[in-house]
Image: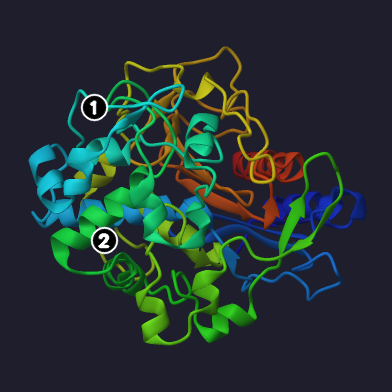
Amino acid sequence: MVNEKAQEAVQKSLDGVTGDKSTGVAGIVFVAVDKNGKQIAASASGKTGLNDRAPMTMDTVFWIASCTKLLATMACLQAVEQGKLKLDDHKQVYELCPELEKVQVLQDGGKLVEKKKDITLRMLLSHTAGFGYEFFNPKLRDYGRPVGFDVFHADVKDIYRMPLVNQPGEGWEYGINIDWAGIVLERATGVKLNDWIQEHIMQPLGLENINMFPTDAMKKELAFMHQRWPGGSEAEERDHVYREPLLAETEHEKKHIFHSGGAGAYAPPAEYVQVLAALLNDGKSPVTGKQILKKETVELMWENQVPNMPDFARQGIPAAKPEQTNPAPELYPQEGNPPQGWGLSFMLTQEAGATGRGKNTAWWAGIANLFWWCDREKGVAGMIASQVMPFGDAHVMGQWGACEAAVYAALKEG
């Protein structure tokens, strides 16, 4: 049973945004669970699209974009547990991906220089290998032109073409690192990333609708994509940002589509939070009882990988492609500016947050304004999902904070 106070507060908050046409947010789904996988609150609000589409439901499917990174990282760590991959062996990485031995570092002005340090799987999973994203990095964006880069085209050629934007190990920068980690896994095991995720994560968890290639049933539940164009405040429906997997129907067509560990999956939030519930429960599904990661592996994921970079997320992110992202002066502002951490594929808010979350809560996001969090200290996890571009939509982020706070407030009241 859901917590009635949390449910009522969340539904009222979401309806206040989706019911106001001026916000441009057609619909939102929010789900929070405890470590037993039981829903604390589960609310679908509004419509699947602004043009008077069907109502949002708990079955609505979203492109989860960078929320995929957690799944790809868990897949890689399963392979580490099995002895097929090593976190700190650059020689193994280069044997599997000789491209990473040869990759060069892009300088200001467009010059390429040799890298000084070697790339490991741990660096890829902690975004310290030196790769960037073209929509966050003007230097990389400009280097790719006149053709340009598009990581949302489901084509591995874009990944292969990108140089590093920093020397390995010298800084944190969000980028295609986990796409490369997925490629490392595929070459080590001979198994395509989505196939691995289905067999080793989704099937043990009993989840049928998290996939890089949506089933016909999932496509029928797909939310519409929306856009606020630069210079304007109103949103409108737009073509889907990540189209190719939605169009591929035959195995031949699917064969040519890149299994993007960085952004390739689609899911309903109610299923995604069951992955988070397993992480709350030391790698074991509280629903099926299946162990998908060892307890010590989950604890490793929560270890801060960048202790020498306590302000890494305060460097600000420019809107290199303003139709895809708003500028972000800081990723997760906290009063008093406590030290920031990064685990294996997610940010750690090392001090308790204003919403009520505990210490060392993991969280991350997807570019179409989806956000998840996983609080192992207090045994709470959740996700808020929309399909609005560009990233950093104030209305959706406001609801994330409000709904998360409502969940903790209700639990505190008992």
**Whole-percent x and y of residue 283?**
29, 54
Please tell me whether residue 47 is drawn above or below residue 181 in the rendered image. below
Identify the amino acid type marked 1. Answer: Lys
In percent of the image, x 37 and y 64: which residue is there? 259
**Whole-percent x and y of residue 330?**
59, 24
**Whole-percent x and y of residue 67?**
48, 52
**Whole-percent x and y of residue 92?**
9, 46
Q: Is residue 149 left or right of residue 179?
A: right
Q: Earlier in the sequence, mark 2 or mark 1?
A: 1
In percent of the image, x 49 and y 50: which residue is there? 66
For label 1, the residue is 115
* Viewer-closest of 9 and 1: 9
Q: Quadrant of residue 28?
A: bottom right
Give the distance between the C-alpha atoms of the residues marked 2 and 1, in whole angstroms. Answer: 36 Å
Please tell me whether residue 227 is drawn above or below residue 212 in the rendered image. above
Quadrant for the C terminus, please: top right
Quadrant for the N terminus, please: bottom right
In percent of the image, x 30 and y 67: which residue is there? 289
Q: Quadrant of residue 339?
A: top left
SS assignment at label 2: loop
In percent of the image, x 88 and y 57: which residue is there? 19
For label 2, the residue is 292
Classed neighbour count for the residue bearing mark 2: other residues with Cα under 10 Å, few (<14), some (14–19), many (≥20): many
Q: Quadrant of residue 111?
A: top left
> Which residue sits furthest front?
146
Please tell me whether residue 268 is drawn above or below residue 263 in the rendered image. below
Identify the amino acid type marked 2. Answer: Ile
The label number, if any, that marks residue 125 in the structure image:
none
SS assignment at label 1: loop
Please tell me whether residue 38 is drawn above or below residue 204 in the rendered image. above
* Viewer-closest of 98 and 187: 98
